[in-house]
Structures are given as structure tokens and as C-alpha cells.
Amino acid sequence: MYDYTGWIVQANAGRDKDGIFCVVGVDQEGHMLLLADGKRRRLSRPKRKKLGHVSCLTDDQSRMYDHPVVHSLKQGEPVSDRALRRALAAFKEGYSLGKR
């Protein structure tokens, strides 16, 4: 089973279509990603979504956004919803400016 933790993804289907989320884990069967954005979907209750219903927004080589919060998630350290919101806001700002 591949570890998708730390990927920044965009929802392609469902109520949260076009929303940007961070993958905070994978369910026990390995078929669903656990997504959070820190606001509507908090880390305590992540959204379960199939891998086919999201698209990756990070580059193909590292598949990870270089931010301390993402590194903490990847290492299994606790992260606050506020810190996750700030990391995603910084990503969105850079993404809209064409830096990514």
C-alpha cells in the first residue's frame, strides 16, 4: 500500500468538487484517502474519498508540497487545523500565481 500522506489534491467529484485538501492518511483497507482542509473538514474528522475522485496538484517528482506542516503530517506528528489552513492558503497563493 502506497503512502499518500502529504499530497495536496483537488476534489473532482462530489459536494466538495474543486476544493483543495491535504491527504492526512489512508483508510485501513487502502481504498480511500482521508482528506482535511482545516476548516470544513477538520483533522479530527477527515473526509473519505476514493483515489479516483481526486487529482494531485503537486509536482510529479516529489508529490509533496514543501511546507513544515506537511512534513509533520508525513512524520506522524500532531498538527493543528489552524496550521493546516495556513499551509493550504500558502499553497493556493503560490498555485494561483503560477509558481507551482
Image: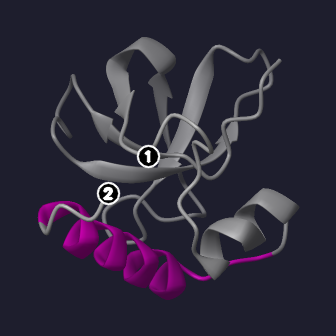
- The image shows residue 29 at horizontal and vertical percentages of 77, 15
Q: Is residue 48 above or below residue 30?
A: below
Quadrant where the image shows the C terminus: bottom left
Q: Nearer the viewer, residue 81 or 68?
A: 68
Magenta segment: 78-96
Amino acid at the residue labelled 2: Arg
Could you say whether the residue bearing mark 2 is in a helix, strand or loop?
loop
Which numbered disc flags the more N-terminal residue, 2 or 1?
1
Picture quarter with the N terminus: top right
Q: Nearer the viewer, residue 82 or 4?
A: 4
At which x and y percent is residue 46? 53, 50
Where is residue 42? Give x, y as percent: 47, 65
In the rendered structure, are the residues bearing label 2 and label 1 in contact, judged by CB atoms less than 8 Å apart? yes
What secondary structure is the stretch in magenta mostly built from? helix
Give amino acid for label 1.
Thr
Closer to the camera: disc 2 or disc 1?
A: 2
Q: Which residue is mark 1?
A: 58
List the residue tagged with mark 2. 100
Residue at 68% x, 46% y: name it: 5
- The residue located at (76%, 34%) in the rendering is 3
